Amino acid sequence: MTEKDARKELMRRANELNPTVHIGKDGLDQGLYDEITNQLKKNRLIKVKVLSNSDDGAKDAATAIEEATGAVAVDVRGGVIVLTDKRTWTSLSQKKF
């Protein structure tokens, strides 16, 4: 499976998810990174919503989250970021059919 196919598969799975982490006016801090890490360990695929009152844009927030948590940003659309953990990303992108 190529990275493009893995991205499509994860987006298909994320279609039914609701955002579980919200980035508001306080922005990104260590507590938020810890929460994202904990949810990724538990669920492996989550959505993060960047609210309009946040100082961070969705793409900037996705980059910062990737660097701080080691997660992979599968997709960024509007104010929603779809994240997965490294293990899920590598297993899907290297999967053979």
Image: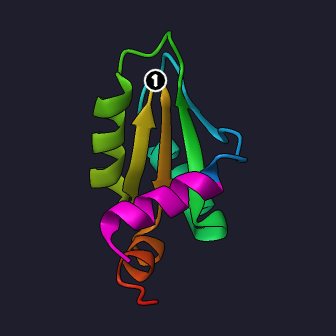
* Residue 74 drawn above or below residue 38: above
Q: Position of residue 89 (x, y in %)?
A: 41, 71
> On screen, 93 above or below 45?
below
State the residue in front, 48 or 14: 14
Quadrant containing the N terminus in the rendered view: bottom left
Say which quarter of the image contains residue 69.
Answer: bottom left
Q: Is residue 5 left or right of residue 2?
A: right
Whether the magenta-drawn stretch holds residue 96 is answered as no
Judge from the rendering whether residue 59 lies leftward or rightward of residue 7; answer left or right: left
Q: Is 20 or 88 nearer to us in this picture?
A: 88
Q: How is the image coloured?
A: rainbow
The picture places residue 57, in percent across and down from the top left corner, at 35, 22
Amino acid found under the numbered disc labelled 1:
Gly
Q: Could you tell me which secondary element the residue under label 1 belongs to?
A: loop
Magenta stretch holds residue 8: yes
Residue holding disc 1: 78
Main SS class of the magenta portion in the image: helix
Q: In this figure, what is the number of numbered marks?
A: 1
Q: Which residues are magenta?
A: 1-13
